[in-house]
Image: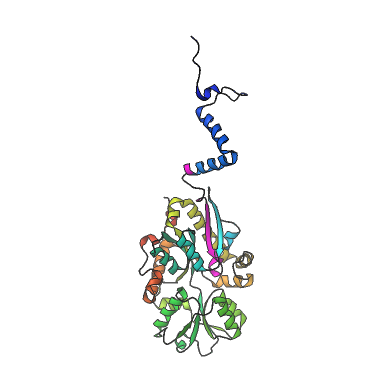
Amino acid sequence: MPARQQSGPAILTERKGLGPLSWSRFFYIIKIKRLGMKRFAAFLITSVLVLAGLSAQDTNITLFTLKGPSGVGMVKLFETAPQAKGYVISIEALAQADLMAAKFLSGEAQVGILPPNVAAKIASSGKGIAVAAVIGQGMLKLISADPAVTRIEDLKGKTVEVAGQGATPDYVFRRILRFYKLDPDKDVQLGYALAYPEIAQSLIAGKITLALLPEPFATMALGGKKKLQVVGDIQAEWVKAGGNSNYPMTVLVVSRDLAQKHPAAVRAIYDSIRESISWVTAHPSEAGALVEQYNLGLKAPIAAAAIPKSSYVFIPAVQARPALESLYKAFLEYAPQSIGGKLPADSFYLDVENLGK
């Protein structure tokens, strides 16, 4: 009886020693011919990513930081970006916090840094973001060119420049003034017309006599005019006024969706920022040079001189919660809407170190 003839791709028997073709190889060849090699390569890569539970978009993650003092602690990452297998992580510096907030609100940003009150406000709007760590604490100084002002109590009837109405420094200072029985809306005139660099330059030029400045702008002002002096210790005054230890000024924020789907990438970013801050505080001169090299808004000598006087830290969100809530209570006193009208929920505090465990 004659052998039964094979059908399908088995008819395509051995060609140049390749052996018989299976159905899968047959359709593989047909697909290549239909799509073309370049299109098929893209199809194949996407298929692999989908099978791995990823997407082509998810593999590229941008870490957003800010130019100026908030971004100084992360400057080492511009040389060596966070590394995680299967991910391409880049870093980008934005000029202003409101640009960062807009990116989180639109969903473009999934990990970055924000002022604490802005982070709480965005979370209250329904955006699924959480604080992963506090990376900058209070570094404010009250600077005076007025010899009559040597204590907080001496500010009655005076004008103090405070950049950023409604920002953390504003509400910290308001609570301190109230502690000393000074009404910030009647007894002291608070000015908000100038940005931090302009305030520093105005102090040096003698155009203003009193200002609340963060580092590195305090160092810039003090280095430019010998007659300027620091009045009190704002961080210590905050504690006297009922604050919990030092007050957070910058937080690392992560979308909960990113943390849930890609914990390895989030942990890599988290660990890299901690390492960068540790390096920056230990090597201020080298860090200052990088700040200028990567155009983060400060000249190397100013950045290097300010780093030891600044409070760059890395405190996991779970540990930082009491200090954050103490600050949020100050916002609730004066402008509840600035943090969404209530204290953030438990889910706002992300335990990165136990992600995926």
Image x and y of residue 47, in percent: 50, 41
Q: Is residue 258 above or below residue 215?
A: above
Q: Quadrant of residue 72?
A: bottom right
Image x and y of residue 5, in percent: 50, 17
Image x and y of residue 261, in percent: 44, 51
Q: Which residues are magenta?
A: 50-73
Q: Is residue 199 above or below residue 277?
A: below
Would residue 214 be counted in the magenta stretch?
no
Count of numbered circles on the image:
0
Image x and y of residue 78, in percent: 59, 60
Q: Report the residue at 58% width, 82% height from top.
A: 202
Q: Quadrant of residue 328?
A: bottom left
- Front position in the image: 289 or 198: 198
Tell me, yes or no, if residue 226 can be seen here: no
Q: Is residue 20 left or right of residue 337?
A: right
Tell me, yes or no, if residue 124 can be seen here: yes
Check the image and tell me how it is coloured. rainbow
Q: Report the residue at 45% width, 73% height from top.
A: 168
Q: Is residue 227 left or right of residue 174?
A: right
- Front position in the image: 128 or 175: 128
Q: Report the residue at 44% width, 75% height from top.
A: 166
- Front position in the image: 110 or 303: 110
Would residue 70 be counted in the magenta stretch?
yes
Q: Quadrant of residue 82?
A: bottom right
Find the residue positioned furthest to the top: 1
Q: Report the residue at 53% width, 41% height from top.
A: 43
Find the residue positioned furthest to the front: 34
